[in-house]
Image: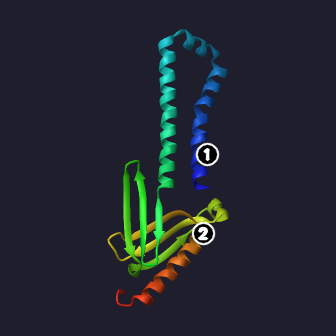
């Protein structure tokens, strides 16, 4: 659903120039006849509109890459956060479960509440102070599972516990 909302945003931007063109055509129809007779202005408009739609395509692709390539892995020993922050920039962080100090889940808004997705914050004692799992389904269950894994890890590895 999160990606669908971003796609809806892009689709609304796709319709925007069409709506503006329709309004201009209704208000000033003679402009369109002049554009067709002036080939350089027509070519300029075609290039500008093509650049606009290409930019929208890139923006949608950026949203898709950001959504699809963000990965969070929770094992019985550590938490791994793989975050794609741009087209060619990826950050990979990991932390032992023994260093987890606090786990918080948050659901904000009407749509996330009804669809049950939100954010989980994991406070650690490591270099990266806070891991953030964004827009994940069932954040309360994920928080409970991580807390359970942390307690289980601390019971089975008391010498690593700080």
Circle 2/circle 1 CB separation < 8 Å: no
Q: What residue sits right under mark 1 in the picture?
A: 8
User: Which of the 4 image quarters holds residue 20?
Assistant: top right
**Residue 141 at what x, y percent from top left?**
58, 74
Residue drawn at (37%, 62%) of the image: 92
The CA span between labels 2 and 1 is: 23 Å
Secondary structure at badge 1 equals helix
Going by the image, does 114 lie left or right of 39? right
User: Which of the 4 image quarters holds residue 83?
Assistant: bottom left
**Residue 148 at what x, y percent from top left?**
52, 82
Residue 139's label in the rendered image is none
Q: How is the image coloured?
A: rainbow
Q: Nearer the viewer, residue 13 or 85?
A: 85
**Residue 91 at what x, y percent from top left?**
37, 59
Decide: is 107 above or below 150.
above
Residue drawn at (43%, 72%) of the image: 79
User: Which quarter of the figure is the C terminus placed in?
Assistant: bottom left
Question: In the displayed image of the protein, which residue is found farthest to the left?
Answer: 127
Marks 2 and 1: which is nearer the front? 2
**Residue 133 at what x, y percent from top left?**
49, 65
Secondary structure at badge 2 equals loop
Disc with the residue nearer the chain's start (2 vs 1): 1
Question: In the displayed image of the protein, which residue is found farthest to the top?
Answer: 37
User: Which quarter of the figure is the N terminus placed in?
Assistant: bottom right
Q: What residue sits right under mark 2 in the picture?
A: 138
Label 2: how many Cα within 10 Å (few below 14, some 14–19, many 20+): some
Going by the image, does 43 lie left or right of 87? right
């Amino acid at each position: 659903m999160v990606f669908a909302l971003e796609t809806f945003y892009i689709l609304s931007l796709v319709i925007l120039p069409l709506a503006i063109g329709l309004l201009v055509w209704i208000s000033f129809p003679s402009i369109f006849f002049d554009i067709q007779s002036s080939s350089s202005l027509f070519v300029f408009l075609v290039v500008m509109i093509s650049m606009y739609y290409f930019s929208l395509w890139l923006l949608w692709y950026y949203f898709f890459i950001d959504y699809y390539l963000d990965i969070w892995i929770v094992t019985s020993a550590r938490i791994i956060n793989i975050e794609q922050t741009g087209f060619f920039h990826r950050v990979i962080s990991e932390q032992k479960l023994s260093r987890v100090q606090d786990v918080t889940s948050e659901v904000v808004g009407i749509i996330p509440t009804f669809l049950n997705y939100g954010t989980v914050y994991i406070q650690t004692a490591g270099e990266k102070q806070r891991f953030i799992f964004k827009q994940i389904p069932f954040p309360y269950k994920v928080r409970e599972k991580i807390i359970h894994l942390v307690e289980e890890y601390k019971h089975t590895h008391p010498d690593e516990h700080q």
